[in-house]
């Protein structure tokens, strides 16, 4: 298995632009997680899904952030409009069951100018 | 106060030394993860444990539920062990992870 796949790996955009990050979980995994990592705050959980249904989005910073999981093999995290403080590495992870071992993707490094 | 505290924040060791990284948590958990993040940024899950001890190669993880404390040990450390080690508590029966700030380990040859 290729593991969790994220795209793009790097994204540089200007403030105000829409950014879409993509994630393909490991086939057969039922849970998917979006995390953000910054130097100041470390790793933070943004939102997670179980069987394609959002379970907890309390970590989403504000309404500019939205996430979807239209099917078991694809999820997106969208930021609209983006701001410089959104610059971070965004990780996607998947697990077989909700409380199981999580497998992380390589991350998307986002820079908002 | 963070719900998950790690110590030390930074650790420098000589190759071959025995290393211990500590993690304390104040929340009720169903399990605890130890993660490794290499300088390139990738995150790898090392252990997930809810009781007792687990061993994988030179790595050993222990957890004491009553004391709300977990340790990660590395025996015969090697420069390739240099990375950031992160503990993360699993809140309740759900999957949400609460992360520690990480311990940056540097092993010198």
Image: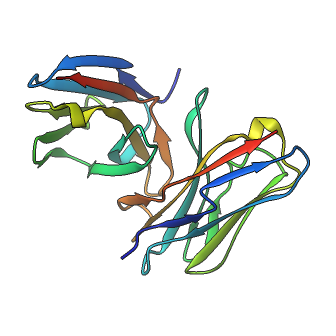
User: Does residue A35 appear anywhere in the picture?
Assistant: yes
- Residue A77: image quadrant is bottom right
User: What residue is drawn where x is 50% and y is 69%?
Assistant: A31
Q: How many marks?
A: 0
User: What residue is drawn where x is 47% and y is 75%?
Assistant: A30
Quarter in which the N terminus of chain A is drawn? bottom left
- Residue B14: image quadrant is top left
B84 over A82 or under it: above or below: above
A42 over B90 or under it: above or below: above
Direction from residue A52 to residue B35 in the image, left or right: left
Direction from residue A67 to residue A3 in the image, left or right: left
User: What residue is drawn where x is 10% and y is 22%?
Assistant: B17
Looking at this view, name the residue that lies furthest to the front.
B109
- Residue B34: image quadrant is top left
The x and y percentages for residue A43 are 54, 39
Question: Relative to the observer, which residue lies in front, A12 or B55?
Answer: A12
Looking at this view, name the residue that lies furthest to the right.
A16
Question: Relative to the observer, which residue lies in front, A60 or B82?
Answer: B82
Direction from residue A40 to residue B84 in the image, left or right: left
User: Does residue B8 appear anywhere in the picture?
Assistant: no
The x and y percentages for residue A34 are 59, 56
Quarter in which the C terminus of chain A is drawn? top right
The x and y percentages for residue B35 are 35, 44
Give the colour scheme of this rendering. Answer: rainbow
Direction from residue A32 to residue B23 in the image, left or right: left
User: What residue is drawn where x is 68% and y is 55%?
Assistant: A57
Question: Relative to the observer, which residue lies in front, A108 or B102?
Answer: A108
């Amino acid at each position: 298995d290729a593991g969790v796949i994220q795209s793009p790996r790097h994204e540089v955009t200007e403030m105000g632009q829409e950014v879409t990050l993509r994630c393909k979980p490991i086939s057969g995994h039922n849970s998917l997680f979006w995390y953000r990592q910054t130097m100041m705050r470390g790793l933070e959980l943004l939102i997670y899904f179980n069987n394609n249904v959002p379970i907890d989005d309390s970590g989403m910073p504000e309404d500019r952030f939205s996430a979807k999981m239209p099917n078991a093999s694809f999820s997106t995290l969208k930021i609209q409009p983006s701001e410089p403080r959104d610059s971070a590495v965004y990780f996607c992870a998947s697990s077989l069951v909700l409380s199981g071992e999580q497998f992380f993707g390589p991350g998307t490094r986002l820079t908002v100018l | 106060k963070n719900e998950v505290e790690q110590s030390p924040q930074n650790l420098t060791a000589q190759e071959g030394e025995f290393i211990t990284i500590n993690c304390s948590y104040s929340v009720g958990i169903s399990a605890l993860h130890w993660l490794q993040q290499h300088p390139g940024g990738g995150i790898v899950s090392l252990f997930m444990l809810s009781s007792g001890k687990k061993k994988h190669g030179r790595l050993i993880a222990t957890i004491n539920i009553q004391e709300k404390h977990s340790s990660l040990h590395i025996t015969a450390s090697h420069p390739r062990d240099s990375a950031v080690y992160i503990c993360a508590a699993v809140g309740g029966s759900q999957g949400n992870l609460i992360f520690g700030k990480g311990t940056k380990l540097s092993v010198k040859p």
